Each structure stands twice: as structure tokens, then as C-alpha cells.
Image (tube, rainbow, N blue to C red):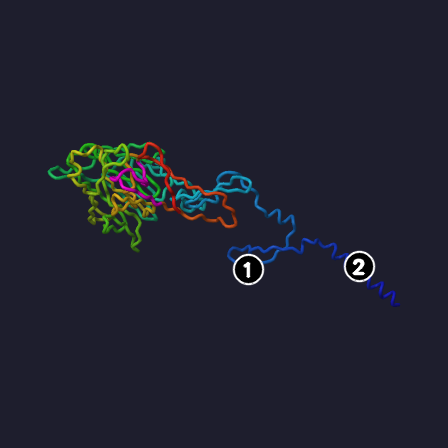
Amino acid sequence: MSKHILRSFLIRILVLFLIFSLVPSKILASEIIPAEDANADLIPVKKKTTNRQVLSTMESEPETGELIDKRTENTKTFYNGNGQYTEKIYSEPVHIKEEGEEQYVEISPELTEVQSQSNIVKTENTAIDTEFLKKMSNGKYADFTYEGHSMSLSILQAAGENRTTVEANDVDAEFVENTNKIVHKDIFPHIDLQNHTFNENIKEDIVISQYDGYHIFIFKLLTDLTASIDENGNIQMKDEQGKKVFELPKPYMSDSKIDEQTGDTVTSDKVKFEIEKIENGYKLTVNADKDWLESTDRVFPIYIDPTTSVTNSSDAFVSSANPTVNYSTATSKWDSSLEDYVLKAGQFDSATGTAFAFLTQPSPTGLSNVTINGCFLQAVNTENCSEKCRDLQALF
């Protein structure tokens, strides 16, 4: 009887062993995954998986080139292959999201014609929605829109001492599509209105090819914003909550006498804004110093600069030759000979002083759990005062 009981017990043990041996060992492994409902509390749950299930959830290797879905406002990410990536980080925005879109697109300040509106040319993709009239209408030449606020610009008159005030001519614009420059020529005798478009500002110039005594220029700004002139001479355009929307930095002027060695032009800050409240907007007066304009030292054309911007520029430079001058504004960094914004660095002589440039560089994002193999700073040297290029030191 005892032998029968022992045999029965051994048989039961063997049966249980066989049953457990049939169960796949991998089923005992598990991974933590988040709750699938995005609106639910993210409580970790356990889900049993097999090797096949794990392989099916692995991401496939991306194609080499830019990863469009990894774009941010200031970065581009590229897959190089073999598990290696390159991220380019820019000191200013290079991408923008169009309203209602999730995907970033390239910023493009180039001008394109609007098919549905025959008299309009506009920027392709910019923070400021910028439109120009191909032919001016009662002095109106542009509309700027940003964050639901708009500003319509018209140039009305030119005046000067012992000069008859002249009305602006409604002229046709000259521009080349897919460039960022537009000119309304001869709005006044020997005076043009020129604009360069960028993502966050519009660089405007009153271009004087011959001085006939006109140094006061009257504009009309139609806007829902409130304008005021601050202690530095800038016009601040603010909404009802007091938030700055547009800024017109204090203007300056420069002539075309370019130093062959430094590339600098002769400039003057003897230009000021005046504003007067009118119905639905403001009368804006740009008053340039007539003595500077009529000096025999001037080389024409002369450029008088009223710029419109939506941001405070974050890049800047300082100069030992002019230690109290603010070189952070867009107007102070504009180079009329290059038709672009520049930062100065280094020294040429005692007259130019020593300049130090400061670049805003956003920090990298999304670089956790990676090995960084190299980092490079790229900057474009647009002009060099020396016969041969010199190395510049970058400090981080």
C-alpha cells in the first residue's frame, strides 16, 4: 500500500513538472509602459511581451538627412547613419509654425506675389506677416501684422526750411520675386523708399540721391496699438495690456563714403521721431539733421533709417572707441554697403577701437543619453580689414 501511495505522489510531481516546462520562459519577463490613454493618469502598468512583440515595437532606422519632425524654432537635426546624428543650433529662429499647423517650416523672408490680390506682394513665411503694395495708394505702401495686431503705413509728405511741402507720389514698386528687397522710387524728387524684409523686422530706408533741402518726412500709421516714445528715442507700440508688439528703434542715417580698409560708412544719430495721435492711429514725423545732410563731406546716396521690429535683438557688440553707444539694436548693426546685419569683432586701429561681439546661442535640447563626439561654431566673416584673415577667439 505504501509503495502505491509513493508511486502516485511521484506521478503527480512529474505531471506538474511537465506542465510548467510547457510554459515559455519569456512570459515571465515584463516591461513597464505608460497608460495608452493620453488623458488618463500616467500610472505604470505591467504588460507581458514576447521577443516577437518587442521587435515589432522597435523604431526603424531613419533615412539619412534632415529629420523634419525633430525641428525646433532654432534647430535642425540630421541623421548621419550608423546611429549618429548632427544637430545644428542657430542663434536666431530658422523655422516657424504656420497657424493651425504642427509641423515647422523654413522661414523665408523672400517676396512673392499674391495670386488672389494683383496689387500685393508679401513675404513667404515670416513672424511679421508683411505685405507691400505694388503701386502705392494715397501714400500707403505696406501692412504689417503680428500676433493679431496690425499696422498700416503711408508716407505722405516731405518738408524743409524754406521749401514748399511736397506730397508723396503714388509710384509703382520695383522688386525681384524671391528676393527680400523692394523699392518705391521717386516718391519725392531724388528720394526713394526702400525696404528689406527679414523674419522679425523690416529694414526701411529713405534714400536721398541728391539733397534738395527736404529733411522732414511725414508718415501715417493706422493701428489698434498705443504708441509712445521711450527715453532712448524708440517708439514702442503696445496692446491694451501694455505688452510691446512692435518697436521702431531710434533712427540714424549714413552716407555712401565707405572706408576702404574698415568697410565702415559715415553715420549720424541726429535723427529723431515725433508722434501725434490722430483718428485710428498716429502721425509720425522723421526729422533728420539738415546740417549733416547738406555738409560738403557727404557722399550720396544717403540712407535715413526707420526700422520696424517685433523683438529686442539679442546679439550685440561693444566698441572701446564708443563705449556708451548701444550696439544691440537692429539699426546699429545694419551695414548699408552689405545690405545686411553684422557684428564687429577685433581691432583695426586706434580710431576704430577694439570690438567684442556677443552671440546668443540657445542650449541644445533632447540630447539626453547620447555621446557627443564633436561641437563646432560656424560664423560668416563678411569683411576683413586686414590683408589676410586673422583667427578670432570664441569664448563660451
Q: Position of residue 240 (x, y in %)?
A: 29, 54
Q: Neighbour class for label 1 at 10 Å: few (<14), some, many (≥20)?
A: few
Name the residue nearer the viewer: 322 or 80: 322
Q: Which amino acid type is marked by label 1?
A: Ile
Quarter the N terminus occupies = bottom right
- The residue where tag 1 is placed is 43
Name the residue nearer the viewer: 257 or 177: 257
First to last magenta residue range: 339-358
Please tell me whether mark 2 sits on a helix, a strand or a loop: helix
Name the residue nearer the viewer: 99 or 159: 159
Q: What residue sits 55% from the left and 56% below the top?
A: 34
Per the rendering, the mark at residue 196 is: none
Reply yes or no: does residue 148 show up in magenta.
no
Of the two numbered discs 1 and 2 on the same chain, state the one appearing first in sequence. 2
Quadrant of res 221: top left
Outermost residue, right direction?
A: 1
Q: What residue sits 63% from the left and 49% below the top?
A: 53
Q: CA distance from mark 1 to mark 2?
A: 41 Å
Outermost residue, front direction?
A: 350
Q: Position of residue 234 (x, y in %)?
A: 25, 48
Mark 1 or mark 2: which is in front? 2
Name the residue nearer the viewer: 170 or 366: 366
Per the rendering, the mark at residue 14 is: 2
Q: Which amino acid type is marked by label 2?
A: Leu
